[in-house]
Image: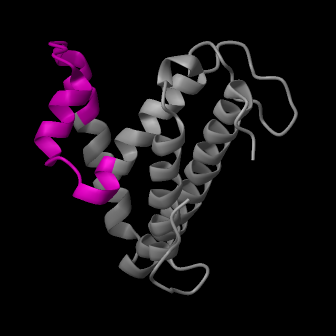
Amino acid sequence: MQVLTKRYPKNCLLTAMDRYLAVVRNMEQVVMIPSLLRDMQLSAHGYQAQAGASDLYSYFTMLKAIRMDVEHGLLPRQEWQAKVAGGKANGAETEAGETEEAEEERVSGQLDLEAQLHLHFASLHHILTHLTLKAEEVTRRYQEKTGQAM
């Protein structure tokens, strides 16, 4: 696993981002045959996986895609919306989304910017920490399956 070269405070967002990127890079280096992850369920600390839960291969591809976004930035909003829509031509969904978006902007305008920043910062830190744990779990499970357990 790569060692962090920069030192930030423990709860710094940059620390969480660096740790996430390092863990996902390690996962990519360890998982040489990603197809082995298919049909393996992510166990939540000893509990059985929920029915219908994603397999480890889905987590592996999602974690890699998120790493690309964190390292290289996000798509412009219009490109992202087009990608998410996937060519859906349902006008009612678009209108509902625009109405919801307008409502969200109205509510967010009422909150002060400092509170919004704190909320999003804390949420992003929590999400990155959670994704880091998922990447470590994918790596660990792959190593167990291939007999490479450390």
Q: Look at the magenta stretch and give its main secondary structure.
A: helix
Colouring scheme, one of rainbow, by chain, secondary structure, one colour: one colour
Residue 13 vertical placement versus 26 (above, below): below
Dividing the picture into quadrants, the one containing residue 45 is top right
- Location of the N terminus by quadrant is bottom right
Name the residue rendered at 45%, 83% in the picture. 6
In the displayed structure, does residue 141 sit left or right of residue 66? right
Magenta residues? 68-97
In the displayed structure, does residue 51 sit left or right of residue 112? right
Name the residue rendered at 52%, 24% in the picture. 57
Tell whether position 78 is magenta. yes
Q: Can residue 95 be seen in this view?
A: no
Q: Can residue 131 be seen in this view?
A: yes
Image spot of residue 110 (x, y percent): 37, 68
Image spot of residue 4 (x, y percent): 50, 74
Taking the view exactly as shown, the residue that stands out farthest to the right is 46
Task: Pick the residue in front: 32 or 109.
Answer: 32
Image spot of residue 104 (x, y percent): 34, 50
Name the residue rendered at 25%, 47% in the picture. 102
In the displayed structure, does residue 89 sit left or right of residue 140? left
Q: Give the number of marks.
A: 0
Name the residue rendered at 46%, 68% in the picture. 18
Tell whether position 116 is magenta. no
Task: Pick the residue in front: 110 or 46.
Answer: 46
